[in-house]
Image (cartoon, rainbow, N blue to C red):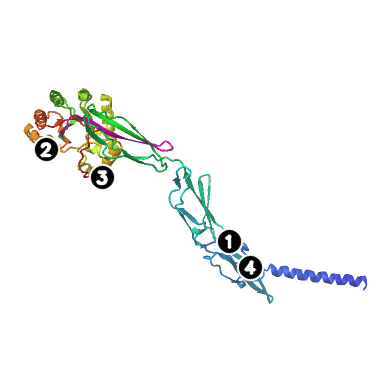
């Protein structure tokens, strides 16, 4: 074969190749997609079909087939087909429906938990759910590191959720210490006093050290305090007190004369004079008056009486508007008494008594809460079981005398008598000496209220 023929054949071959390649390129690019060839759609989101176009025929001749289920994760194909010069040309778009929402992982119990010392944390549980895969609780993986527990769960689409639980190994809870028997106790002079004891427990420590400080000297009449302090393994402490009175009177009848709403310039000095004359001690539940009367509070204390707390304002609307208002009022009179006597007094009487209903007008349920909290804070609050009626029904000194003597029981060791030393309360002043004589004649003894005196309280009505 000569060289000329070879050149012709090569030329023809190149032409054919150009024609074939061009045809392939032409038909391949006859259809072009609008948008991307691969599209991702979030689960439950709508797929938007953008279509295709061609440069040589009407776009309406393009046939589109295929469906996308947006509620099911998967890969879907959309086919675009057109005929040109009797030849079918097609193109495809890939649509991926993907789950992008991570599972929800919820811890049972607290995010921060207290664990005693090196004790193992007892798992409180957890739940894991996924909007697409459902319950994944059994797929949760747990890892603990540096007192942090990591909970991790992954759905079938690779979405991952991690939550943490923090382990607090500091023991911040103090021991529980309770007295066996009453917080107040009494014993007769020269007899033996036996401490009823206590009960103690702790959330962590099996062994709790309890120290008892104080001593009851039964050879001397007086009031004594026993202090119990419980300490756990890390130094948390709880302290409670028991108040014990040693008395030389075996008679069960004890009368506590109490005076509210003083001091006053007219009544209080006369009452103090009678008490001094009869050698009787009493209890004064004071309120705030002019500083010019402070000398009477000092006199009450210096003459051996108990100066207890009643109220700073004795204004029901103010005192019972809230617990915060109550404690603000109480602490103000407490500070005043401490300033005048040097004693931080914890003996108190609610304005209107714990059974009052007037507090309902200002704060529902406040007395139920206060009576509980006051004990928890270490206060001793006293109501009364004998009323003189001198702030209400009693019109004369004879009325006051009859009310008190009728109410006193010679078989009772806690006759708490309610009287008042407000201004010009002559009916009480004039009945007082006769009331004392009556009690002494019945073999009763008179005493002042202190922290060893068993509380006399009313039923709460609010």
Helix, strand or loop under label 1: strand
Residue segment shown in magenta: 230-251
Mark 3 in CB contact with mark 2 (< 8 angstroms): no
First in sequence: mark 4 or mark 1? 1
Q: Does the rendering let one see residue 450?
A: no
Q: Which dot, 2 or 1, sits closer to the camera?
A: 2
**Mark 2–mark 4 distance (CA, rounded to whole Å):** 104 Å
Name of the residue lying farthest toward the right: 2
State which quadrant residue 389 falls in: top left
The residue identified by callout 3 is 365
Q: Say whether residue 131 is magenta.
A: no
Mark 2 in CB contact with mark 1 (< 8 angstroms): no
Mark 2 in CB contact with mark 4 (< 8 angstroms): no
Residue 181, given in percent of the width and then of the height, sits at: 27, 39
State which quadrant residue 199 falls in: top left
Q: Which mark is residue 416?
A: none
Q: Which dot, 3 or 4, sits closer to the camera?
A: 3
Q: Which mark is residue 40?
A: 1
Helix, strand or loop under label 4: strand
First in sequence: mark 3 or mark 4? 4
Q: Which mark is residue 92?
A: 4
**Mark 4–mark 1 distance (CA, rounded to whole Å):** 15 Å
Q: Say whether residue 238 is magenta.
A: yes
């Amino acid at each position: 074969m000569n060289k000329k023929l070879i050149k012709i054949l090569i030329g023809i071959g190149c032409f054919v190749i150009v024609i074939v390649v061009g045809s392939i390129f032409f038909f391949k690019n006859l259809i072009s997609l609008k948008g991307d060839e691969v599209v991702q759609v979030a689960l439950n989101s709508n797929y938007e079909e953008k279509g295709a176009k061609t440069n040589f025929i009407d776009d309406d001749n393009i046939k589109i087939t295929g469906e996308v289920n947006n509620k099911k994760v998967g890969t879907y194909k959309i086919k675009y087909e057109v005929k040109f010069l009797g030849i079918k040309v097609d193109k495809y778009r890939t649509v991926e429906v993907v789950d992008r929402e991570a599972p929800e992982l919820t811890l049972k119990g607290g995010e921060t938990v207290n664990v005693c010392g090196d004790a193992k944390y007892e798992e409180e549980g957890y739940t894991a759910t996924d909007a697409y895969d459902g319950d994944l609780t059994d797929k949760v993986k747990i890892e603990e590191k540096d007192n942090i527990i990591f909970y991790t769960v992954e759905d079938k689409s690779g979405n991952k959720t991690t939550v943490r639980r923090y382990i607090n190994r500091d023991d911040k809870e103090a021991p529980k210490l309770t007295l066996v028997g009453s917080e107040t106790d009494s014993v007769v002079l020269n007899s033996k006093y036996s401490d009823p004891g206590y009960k103690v427990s702790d959330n962590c420590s099996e062994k709790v050290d309890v120290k008892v400080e104080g001593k009851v000297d039964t050879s001397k009449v007086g009031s004594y305090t026993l202090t119990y302090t419980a300490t756990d393994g890390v130094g948390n402490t709880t302290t409670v007190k028991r108040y014990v009175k040693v008395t030389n009177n075996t008679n069960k009848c004890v009368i506590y004369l109490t005076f509210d709403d003083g001091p006053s310039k007219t009544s209080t000095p006369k009452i103090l004079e009678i008490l001094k004359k009869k050698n009787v001690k009493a209890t004064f539940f004071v309120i705030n008056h002019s500083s010019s009367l402070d000398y009477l509070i000092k006199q009450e204390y210096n003459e051996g009486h108990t100066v207890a707390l009643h109220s700073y304002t004795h204004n029901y609307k103010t005192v019972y508007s809230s617990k915060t208002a109550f404690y603000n009022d109480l602490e103000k009179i407490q500070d005043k008494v401490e300033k005048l006597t040097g004693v931080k007094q914890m003996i108190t009487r609610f304005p209107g008594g714990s059974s009052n209903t007037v507090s309902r007008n200002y704060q529902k349920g406040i007395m139920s809460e206060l009576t509980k909290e006051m004990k928890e804070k270490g206060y001793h609050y006293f109501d009364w079981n004998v009323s003189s009626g001198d702030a209400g029904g009693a019109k004369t000194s004879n009325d006051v005398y009859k009310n008190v003597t009728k109410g006193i029981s010679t078989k009772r060791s806690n006759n708490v008598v309610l009287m008042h030393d407000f201004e010009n309360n002559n009916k009480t002043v004039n009945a007082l000496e006769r009331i004392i004589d009556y009690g002494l004649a019945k073999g009763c003894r008179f005493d002042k209220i202190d922290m060893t005196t068993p509380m006399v309280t009313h039923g709460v009505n609010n």
